[in-house]
Image: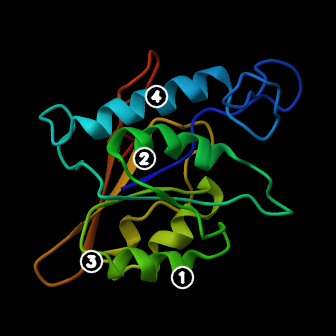
Amino acid sequence: MFIRHGEKPADDGPPLGVDKHGQHDPHSLSVRGWTRAGALAALFDRLPSATHPGLTRPGSVIATQPTHDYRSKRERDTAAPTAGRLGLTIDDSFTHHDAEEAAASILAQDQDVLVVWHHGSMPKLLHHFPLADASQIPQAWPENRFDLVWVLSREDNGTYAFSEANQDLLADDLPASV
């Protein structure tokens, strides 16, 4: 399961980014993003669920780490409540440039994985999996969407089928677009 980080601060003015202590941090989530991160923790803790078919309780959580050129802490901030609630450690050994290595690590696991990745390189990450139909992968993550889950489900022949689900966690969340 692949998600984008929760909502981010505006480029100029409110909403502002705040760290987990409530201190201003332009590289962290907005208050709405922190709200989403907490709601995601409750969602993933209660899976499987009839309200979210296709989603599973993760046994592992991966989040991209900040780099010198991409200083966002939002992926880790979004993953932390879920990992904490499920008693998991976040694997943050990958940057958003490490798509091939991250895919290999995910494929080597024998459990369901939640990946919180930079949305700009999410399609590239998914193309490193043996896909049943690569044309199903969107060209880009929708810029204004923080409420989606992209899911790769393993089929009997070892390939992965793509689907998209809505999180349906916060007011104004939209339905899936696929």
Determine the CA span between mark 1 and mark 3.
20 Å
Residue bearing mark 2: 83
Q: Residue 95 at what x, y percent from top left? A: 66, 68
Task: Please state which amino acid type lies under the numbered disc 2.
Answer: Ala
What is the spatial separation of the Cα atoms under label 4 and label 2, in whole angstroms?
A: 11 Å
Tell me residue 58's x, y (percent): 30, 53
The quarter of the picture where the N terminus appears is bottom left
CA distance for labels 1 and 4 = 28 Å
Q: Residue furthest front?
A: 87
Kindly state the secondary structure of the residue where label 3 is placed.
loop
Work out whether 139 lies above or below 169: below
Q: Which mark is residue 38?
A: 4
Q: Residue at x 76, y 20 (%)?
A: 15
Disc 1, SS: helix
Residue 66's x, y, as percent? 73, 58
CA gap, disc 2 and disc 3: 30 Å
The circle on residue 132 is 3
User: Is 79 above or below relative to 17?
Assistant: below
Which circle's residue, 2 or 1, is located before the other in the chain? Answer: 2
Cβ atoms at labels 1 and 3 below 8 Å apart: no
Q: Amino acid at mark 3?
A: Ala
* Amino acid type assigned to the residue bearing label 4 in the image: Gly
Cα–Cα gap, marks 3 and 4:
33 Å
Disc number lying in front (2 or 1): 2
The 10 Å Cα crowd at callout 3, few under 14, some 14 to 19, many 20 or more, is some
Give 84 or 26, whichever is nearer the viewer.
Answer: 84
What residue would you read off at disc 1? Answer: 101
